[in-house]
Amino acid sequence: FSYPSSSSTDLTQELIEYLDAVAEFLISNPGYRVVIEGHSDDRGTTTQNLDRSIRRSVEVMQYLLSKNIPRNRIITAGYGAVRPIVPNTNERNRAINRRVEIIILR
């Protein structure tokens, strides 16, 4: 799920709807955990991008915690701009790179 701007860290409605489904899955499947990876585009300093990516993953974690998912089933990570999906050569690509990825683990 991507974010509308480089500085944005708030959950979008689309992400909230997806997170509700993730929470339902985790409640129904207590043997699973999630890794939440925050990412950023290349706008800003390395420190700013790392901070944004961490805030993105923490926002998602806090939402799942509010849905009664235990903290020990959630792993968070922020990678800043070091793991782009596509080159940060234009706005469309930057929008793709500022994202949260959710990985489900057994």
Image (tube, rainbow, N blue to C red):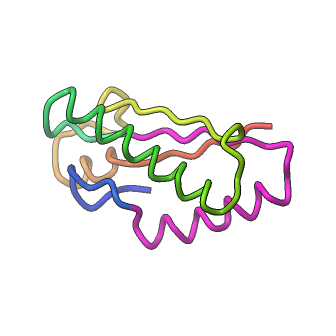
Image: 37 above or below 14: above
Task: Where is residue 59? Give x, y as percent.
Answer: 45, 52
Image quadrant where one finds the N terminus: bottom left
Residue 87 position by quadrant? top left
Q: Position of residue 3 (x, y in %)?
A: 32, 57
In front of the other: 9 or 106: 9
Residue lying at 63% horizontally and 42% vertically, measured from the top left: 103
Q: Image check: 52 left or right of 75? A: left
Rendered location of residue 45, percent (x, y): 14, 30
- Nearer to us in this view, 37 or 96: 37
Count of picture labels:
0
| Residue 32 picture quarter | top right
The residue that appears at 60% across and 61% down in the rendered structure is: 66
Is 92 colored magenta in this rendering? no
Stretch of the chain drawn in magenta = 11-38
Tell me what residue is drawn at x 24 percent, y 47 percent: 94
Q: Quadrant of the C terminus?
A: top right
Task: Please tell me whether residue 14 is drawn above or below residue 50 in the rendered image.
Answer: below
Q: Is residue 20 rendered magenta in the image?
A: yes
